[in-house]
């Protein structure tokens, strides 16, 4: 029963938003939705493995930036693949 109630509320919200013709009001709705999504992501707790993966990705991006600045020497793709 609760699912039907949630679906009804969602449909009512969608209908209401669809009927808006005020661009500034639509922008405010969008900002509310966007900030809600980013708040949800900020609350997420990552597992140890996820943190390790994210840290590895951050490290890789920093290395790419250093390579682009000429502060670090990159490897040829062929050499990288040979290491694997």
Image (cartoon, rainbow, N blue to C red):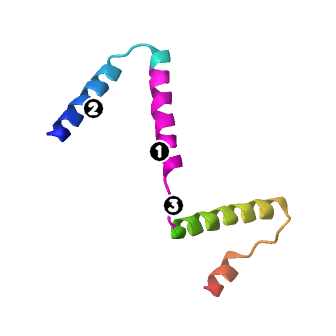
Q: Residues within 10 Å of mark 3 (few under 14, many from 20)?
A: few
Residue 4: x percent and y percent?
16, 37
Q: In this view, does 7 lie to the left or right of 52?
A: left
- Which residue is at 74% across, 65% downward? 63
Say above or below: 28 vs 55: above
Classify residue 41 as left or right of residue 68.
Answer: left
> Within the image, what quadrant is residue 78 found in?
bottom right
Foreground tag (3 vs 2): 3
Q: Which of marks 3 and 1 is nearer the N terminus?
A: 1
| The magenta segment | 26-47
Quick one: quadrant of the N terminus?
A: top left
Residue 44 versus residue 55: which sits nearer the camera?
44
- Residue 76 vs 30, above or below: the answer is below
User: Does dot 3 land on a helix, a strand or a loop?
Assistant: loop
What is the C-alpha distance between the residues marked 1 and 2?
19 Å
Disc 2 element: helix
Q: Which residue is drawn at 25% across and 25% down?
A: 12
Q: Which of marks 1 and 2 is nearer the N terminus?
A: 2
Q: Say which mark, if any, is on residue 46.
A: 3
Location of residue 74 in the rendering, given as x and y in whole percent from the top left corner: 76, 72
Q: How far across and how far down the image is residue 20, in percent?
A: 37, 16
């Amino acid at each position: 029963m609760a699912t039907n109630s949630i679906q009804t509320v969602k449909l009512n919200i969608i209908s209401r938003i669809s009927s808006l013709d005020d661009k500034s009001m639509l922008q405010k709705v969008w900002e509310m939705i966007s900030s809600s999504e980013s708040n949800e992501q900020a609350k997420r707790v990552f597992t140890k493995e996820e943190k390790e993966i994210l840290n590895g990705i951050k490290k890789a991006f920093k290395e790419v930036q250093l390579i682009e600045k000429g502060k670090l020497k990159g490897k040829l793709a062929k050499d990288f693949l040979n290491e694997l």
